[in-house]
Image (cartoon, coloured by chain):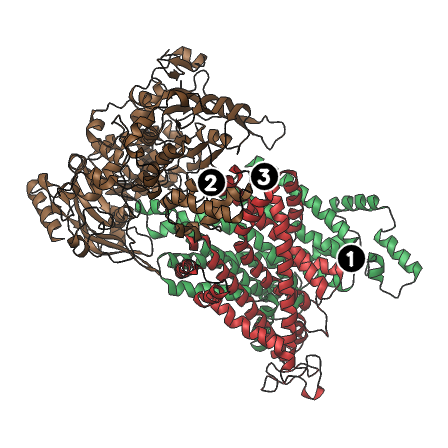
Chain colours: A red, B brown, C green
Amino acid sequence: MEQEAIAGAVRQQASTRGSKPRIPLPFLRFLYANRSARWSVIILVPILLLTFLAPMLPLQSPLESNIRASMSSPSFSHFFGTDKLGRDIFSRTLAGIKVSLFVGFSVALIALIVGTAVGTVSGFFGKAVDRIIMGIVDIFLAFPSLLLAIGLVAIMGAGTLPVICAIAMADIPRFIRLQRSLVLGLKSRTFIDAARTVQAPQLWLMSRHIVPNTIAPLLVAASIAAANAILIEASLSFLGLGILPPEPSLGNIIKDGQMYLQKAWWISTLPGGVILLIAISLHFLSDGIREALDPRARK
Amino acid sequence: MDIATTAAWKSDKREAVKEPLLQVRDLHTHFFTDSGTVRAVNGVSFNLERGERLAIVGESGSGKSAMAMSLIQLIAYPGKLVSGSVKLDGREMVGMSESELNKLRGGSIGTVFQDPISSLDPVMLIEDQMVKPIRMHLKLGAKEARRHAVNLLERVGIPDAERRISSYPFEMSGGMRQRIMIAMALSCKPKLILADEPTTALDVTIQAQIVELLKNLTETTGSAMMFITHDLGLVARFAQKVAVMYAGKIVEFGTVDEIFDTPSHPYTQSLLMTIPGVSDGQRRRLLQIKGFPPDMKKPVVGCAYKDRCPAASERCRLDPPELAEREGGHLAACWLENGLRSGDGGSIEAMLGEERNEPFASAGSGAANGRDGGREPSAGEAADVVLRITDLRKSFRKASMLPWKKATEIRAVSGISFTLKRGETIGIVGESGCGKSTTARMLLKLEEPTGGRIEMNGNTQIVFQDPYSSFNPKMKIADIIAEPLHVRRIGTREERKERVRELIQKVGLDIAYLDRYPSQLSGGQRQRVGVARALALNPTVVVADEPTSALDVSVRAQIINLLCDLKEELGLSFVFISHDLSTVRHISDTIAVMYLGEIVEYGPAEEIFVHPAHPYTKALIEAVPVPDPKIEAAKKLSLLKGELPSPAHPPSGCAFSSRCPLATPVCTEKKPALQPYLDRREVACHAVS
Amino acid sequence: MLSYAGKRLAQLIVTMFGVVTLVFFSIRMIPGDAASAMAGENLSGAALEEMRQKLGLDAPLWRQYSDYLLSVVRFDFGHTITTSLPIAELMLKALPLTMMIACMTVLIAVLLAIPLGTLAAFLANKGRKALDNIITWAAMVVDLMPSFWTGLLLMLFLSLNLKLLPASGDISFGEPGFMLQRIALPVLVLAVSQVATLARITRTAVLEVLNEDYIRTARSLGMTEILVVFRHALKNAMLPIITVIGLSFGHLLSGTVIVEFIFSIPGIGTLLVYGINSRDYPLVQNVILFYAFIFVVINFITDMVYKKVDPRVQF
């Protein structure tokens, strides 16, 4: 029902749009009107601000150690406490978030672009091209995604770039599949026939009719993919296969804390909570996009 | 409400002490959506006598289905029965406990729904779906219940019921599934059957079979029936009483003769005038109801029909009329005693007929009067052939996964020929699967013919059936109309803009609509946009593939009039494809009747309708219900037996031989050719030539 | 049914063939060459050559490929580099623990999630939003918790603080009681997220089905709500649920790697992490292959169950 309210809001918005200049006003209004989107902004914006303003804040640097303050519990001087080496977990977490977000958005972007392009071609042209592409996709989908990423990282080595590539490789087949099924669904729609009756060229059909109608579900999938990529990167780093210390990543901070779980619970638990928050906000974002662009919302 | 109650009381007195089977009083059902409360049923009261067939007529959104579902209290969330009373056999159903209601549902009240495809559980055997309710209501053992179910299936005409009962719904045709739905509804000898558009999803000949079945069953079992439909023809064929609904209320209630002979409410009166008459020979311009039904989220002040009613007065705007008794005992909710016929302001035709689109009025003032003269193509035009189709064929191959299996060939169109002259309309009629849509797709080069020739003089454009899916939801109306120009790189940006403005006005829409998206338009408006787009490239032939079947009755007339006007003004030729015979008859000069990919009869529209030669044409025309109870009563239906054979395995010889009442051994051996018949017609039948 | 199974089996074999090929070539795409990567920088030319031989990298490519295909078919994966143990044996020894964790998780998830999701859908369908919202929200949050984090939290509370379950100790089949206690936490960690995932899917699926026309038909025949939900809605909703159970098994396999790592359980996941850390490429390659094989087989079984529930499915 909440959806219907948003649908109504979107519809109203669309009808009031008219001749006004196209500033992102509707977008802002949407963020306010949509409950999911609002929540995602409420969580995500402070996290983003903290992360990117971290160097300007009076915080201990993420790599700076202070043996005297080893394993001190959360306090006003150290929000998330410190680790064995006396490094500030809060500032390490912020640095980790930066890496996480970078990985998440890079993966989503790569998978979105490559997956959309290949999926469109596969779905639109069909026949042999489609069969070959889908055969390859099936092979990739035979691996559970984290395991494929693990395997790829094992080959490519640790580090931010290999991690991004590995996770993207695991996500691309999923996007290809999604886009292909969307394109196949659209191909049988009457408006494609309508365009074909005026002999619209293939490129026109793809760029004007097919791709614009797949953007909404793709964006939904991309924001979920970003959340998943963040989780997978953290898992890889936790296993000691992703981003290696001393470079902080949420996964390796948590792994470091595992050894001192009983003595210093804060090292592992608090950064983990941050991962959860980011994942939740990205899911809210995807819900928001879904609701805003739902075909039902447009009646 | 008071008047309704007194009226009901009066009818009680008339019927002696005997209580009506169903008494509905002041029923209100609202849907509480977040964007507002939809008052779908807004005070409905009526009685239904035992064994009586009552039709509820109304357009989509009039609340007729919500009303029916309110009776058995099966309204989906966020809908809620707000107030009112429903008495079955004197027992109040509103406020009954769920378990008591469950005894009535499926027991005393059987329900048949519209879409037999989606109304049966797809992953459950027919048997399992039927037997359980029977056991619950009739307290039978498993074996007896199953036997009962098989008997019922036999009774509704399912061949080989014993075997068929253990199959899945997807293994059966739509008609068969609807028979199963009926068998389920009837399984516990209900006193009342609710049927919500039970034949809308079916083909004409199957529809006729189902209607006959329902009629016979209610007559033999004595069940009363409430029948929801938008098809006035079906009402005339089937109903004894009629309730006309508009905006959540019954606006007129009476016997079928009263409603058709002396309608008293302006809405009923107009509705009856908007449908193309099948019986009247000369073609008149269809009358049309202006405007759209009210938004049910807004409270209605005064009469809900006031904005569309040509006779609305100050009183109608303030004071809502209630159902009141008219001459002869029927009820109507209008301040005027005889609706549009009340005043001295001339005929209904005059009140409804002047609605012409502005550009046309200025374009040709003489056209309106001279239209009958324009019908017959003159000799000069006759030579001007714009489309000639010779022996057109299309077959689809369905290859098997297994390489050694032979691909099955489905012949969608097998050798049809016709010619179309400038300014003429050819109507292609036939049931689903007869190849009419494939023909259209070939004309538009959406499908490559596997044989034969299409010669065209000029270009062809199409108006699609479903105005909801034929537009890209992400494109503005302006871009949709301009797309053909854009793709073909015709004119400059400014010229195209100008042309689009011109086009949208031509189809009677305001240029303000150009900035909107398809979702912001109603069905009728979208169909107008579809027409405008089709005109963008100045086509010589417009293919209209069921252009009105997705629209409501009152809007349908607007679109048909628009097409007729354009045909006249622009000298367009139409290929008009439809299963709606009365519309085809209204608009076409020539008709081609198709059956299983072949033309079985071809000739001038009027002649074919008045004297059909081919047995299939005869059956088809007969099967279409006519909105006139007298004609319907006089009809002796000779129903076609069986269903359309699969195009993958057509019968040998004449394709129609498996269903033909005149079939002889010759028919199964030799395929009859399309041969000249009488003056200007052609028929493919051994029995005729 | 049989012909469907046959066709799906053929497809499975083709996919597996592709998987084996991919695994084979990916190991040869290691920057530089697998032998030097494994050996590290401190190996002489002779030792490197020996390593090459050991890995079979000295033979021509087609030969290596055909040898590898043959060895996979014979289920003979050679030996680990570092310890020279037979890989197939190692995997078979580790398999029961991993599969036990996975299967117990699925069982718990199905038993808990389907009733929970159905309940939420039923409430939503009736417009009783409050309880449905609580279930849906809780499921979403739990679903998004990283499993290593949940693992650490549960370890902290249940074994370190409350001392309810052991977090360490040798596992052997000789002591089934202790073994069950040891795998209880890993199963719990995985089950929490599986329940959440499955409950959400069940809710969506059942809710969608409850709006179908045939549900209305069943109600119009006087079927009670319980019958409507269990006889009609759940059976139809099972279709997407089955698919998701099959797919989430992949997620589950990934999860076992993490919980085995956290709780030091000698399953296949531990083998994998060990392999990567010791740069034992043949081990890594074959463990990954093995996971893919399990996943593909699970998907095959899923498809068969699907076909059984929905007779309309065609290849």
Instruction: Where is residue C277? Give x, y as percent.
Output: 76, 64
Instruction: Where is residue C118? Give x, y as percent.
Output: 43, 56
Same-chain check, marks 1 and 3 = yes
Q: Which residue is mark 3?
A: C5
Q: Nearer the viewer, residue C212 or C258?
A: C212
Q: CA distance from mark 1 to mark 2?
A: 66 Å
Q: Residue at x 21, y 46 (%)?
A: B310
| Secondary element at image label 2 | loop
> Is residue A82 at all visible to an observer of this figure?
yes
Subunit ID for the residue under disc 1: C
Q: Quadrant of residue A269?
A: bottom right
Q: Residues within 10 Å of mark 1 (few under 14, many from 20)?
A: many
Q: Residues within 10 Å of mark 3 (few under 14, many from 20)?
A: some
Q: Amino acid at mark 3?
A: Ala
- Rendered view: C295 above or below B686: below
Asked if labels 3 and 1 touch by Cβ distance under 8 angstroms, the answer is: no
Q: Residue at x 54, y 58 (%)?
A: A220
Q: Which residue is mark 1?
A: C281
Q: Residue at x 24, y 23 (%)?
A: B636
Instruction: Where is residue B430? Give x, y as percent.
Output: 39, 27
Q: Which residue is mark 2?
A: B536
* Position of residue C131 in the picture relative to residue C152 (left or right): left
State the mark number for residue B123. Answer: none
Q: Nearer the viewer, residue C214 or B341?
A: B341
